[in-house]
Image (cartoon, rainbow, N blue to C red):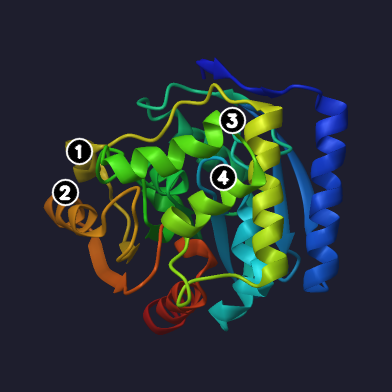
C-alpha cells in the first residue's frame, strides 16, 4: 500500500499525553474503561478502543469515525448504551485523523482504505462484522464494502461524506472555516451549534459538549492535518456488495440529507433502508435514537 499523505502532532509526546488525559476523563465520566489494542497495519500503528471485546458470543460492531474526530465521541453520555442490544464493539482510530494511530494515509480515491479496514478486522480476528461510519467513516465503510464485502454483515452510514460533495453554501463554509482560522473555544462552540447539533432536540450534556469543544480545539491547533477529505464516490458506489443502511439528519449542514438519499438510491443496489431524523445535525453519531436504530436493525434483521 502506497502512503500518499502523512499527518502528525506538532509535539507528539506532549500532545498524546493530553489526549490520554482526555480519554481518562471520559472513562471516569462514563464509569467504564475502554480496552486498548494496538495493531501493526499497512498504514503503521492503528489504535482500537473496545467494549465487551472478549465476549465472542456477542455480535461484533466496528466503528469508523468522522474527520477530525475520534470514535470515542460515539460514547459521549454513554451513547453506545442506546443500542440496547449487547454488542462486541471495536472503535477504530482511523489513520490520518488526530488520535493515537499513525498519520499515514493512502490516496483517498483509491480503494486502499478498504484494504486497510479489512486488515484491521483480520488482525482483530474478526471474520465478519457489522460496520458503522459517520461522515469520513462512511466512506471507509463503502470502500470496505467494495473490496471485501464478505467481511460485512451490514454497513450503517451516518451522514456519510461519500454520497455527495461537501456543501459549498455560504453558511456551511463560514461555520466550518471559523474554528480553523481561529481555533478558539467560542468559535468551535459556534460551529457545533450551527452545524453539528440541533438544540434542543439534538444536544449533549454540558460535560460532554465541553469535552468535544476541548477535543476540537486540540485537534485543530495541535495536529498537522494533511489527510485528504472525503469525496463523492458517485458511480463507484454501484460496486458496493454489502447490505447498507443510511441514517441522516434533517439539519445536516455539511451534507444536506435529501441529496445523500437521492444518490444512495441511485447508486447503491444493496441499500436496505433510509431513515431521516428530524431536527438532527451532522453529528448524528451523538444522537441516541440513531444508536437505537443500529441495535434494533441488527437484532431484528440479522439474528
Which marked residue is nearer to the observer: mark 1 or mark 4?
Answer: 4
Q: Disc 4 and disc 3: Cα gap in Å? A: 24 Å
Quick one: 26 or 40, which is closer to the camera? 26
Q: Which one is earlier in the sequence, the residue at label 1 or at label 3?
A: 3
Which residue is drawn at the image coordinates 25% and 67% (left, top)?
272
Quick one: 222 or 139, which is closer to the camera? 222
Badge 2 vs badge 1, beta-carbon distance below 8 Å: yes
Would residue 69 be visible to someone looking at this image?
no
Q: Which one is earlier in the sequence, the residue at label 4 or at label 3?
A: 3
Query: Label 3: how many residues lie within 10 Å, few (<14), some (14-19) or many (20+)?
Result: many
User: Which residue is the site of mark 4?
Assistant: 187
Q: In this view, does 255 lie to the left or right of 206?
A: left
Q: Is mark 3 on a helix, strand or loop?
A: loop
User: Which residue is the site of mark 2?
Assistant: 267
Count of marks, rendered view: 4
Q: Where is residue 252 in the image (x, y as percent from the top left)?
A: 34, 57
Amino acid at each position: 500500500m502506497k502512503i500518499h499523505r502523512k499527518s502528525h502532532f506538532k509535539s507528539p509526546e506532549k500532545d498524546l499525553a493530553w489526549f490520554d488525559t482526555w480519554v481518562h476523563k471520559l472513562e471516569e465520566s462514563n464509569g467504564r474503561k475502554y480496552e486498548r489494542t494496538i495493531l501493526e497495519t499497512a498504514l503503521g500503528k492503528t489504535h482500537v478502543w473496545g467494549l465487551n471485546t472478549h465476549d465472542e458470543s456477542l455480535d461484533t460492531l466496528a466503528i469508523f469515525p468522522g474527520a477530525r474526530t475520534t470514535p470515542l465521541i460515539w460514547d459521549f453520555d454513554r451513547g453506545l448504551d442506546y443500542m440496547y442490544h449487547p454488542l462486541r464493539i471495536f472503535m477504530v482510530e482511523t489513520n490520518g485523523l488526530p488520535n493515537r494511530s499513525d498519520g499515514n494515509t493512502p490516496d483517498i480515491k483509491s480503494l486502499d482504505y478498504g484494504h486497510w479496514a479489512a486488515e484491521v478486522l483480520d488482525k482483530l480476528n474478526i471474520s465478519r462484522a457489522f460496520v458503522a461510519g459517520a461522515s469520513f467513516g462512511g466512506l471507509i465503510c463503502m470502500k470496505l464494502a467494495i473490496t471485501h464485502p464478505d467481511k460485512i454483515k451490514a454497513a450503517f452510514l451516518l451522514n456519510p461524506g461519500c454520497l455527495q460533495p461537501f456543501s459549498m453554501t455560504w453558511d456551511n463554509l463560514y461555520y466550518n472555516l471559523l474554528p480553523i482560522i481561529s481555533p478558539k473555544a467560542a468559535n468551535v462552540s459556534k460551529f457545533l451549534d450551527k452545524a453539528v447539533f440541533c438544540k434542543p432536540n439534538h444536544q449533549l450534556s454540558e460535560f460532554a459538549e465541553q469535552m468535544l469543544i476541548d477535543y476540537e480545539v486540540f485537534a485543530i491547533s495541535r495536529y498537522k492535518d494533511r489527510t485528504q477529505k472525503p469525496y463523492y464516490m458517485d458511480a463507484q458506489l454501484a460496486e458496493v456488495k454489502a447490505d447498507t443502511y443510511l441514517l441522516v439528519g434533517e439539519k445536516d449542514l455539511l451534507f444536506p440529507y435529501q441529496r445523500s438519499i437521492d444518490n444512495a438510491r441511485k447508486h447503491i443496489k444493496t441499500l436496505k433502508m433510509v431513515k431521516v431524523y428530524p431536527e438532527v445535525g451532522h453529528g448524528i453519531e451523538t444522537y441516541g435514537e440513531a444508536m437505537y436504530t443500529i441495535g434494533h436493525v441488527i437484532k431484528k434483521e440479522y439474528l
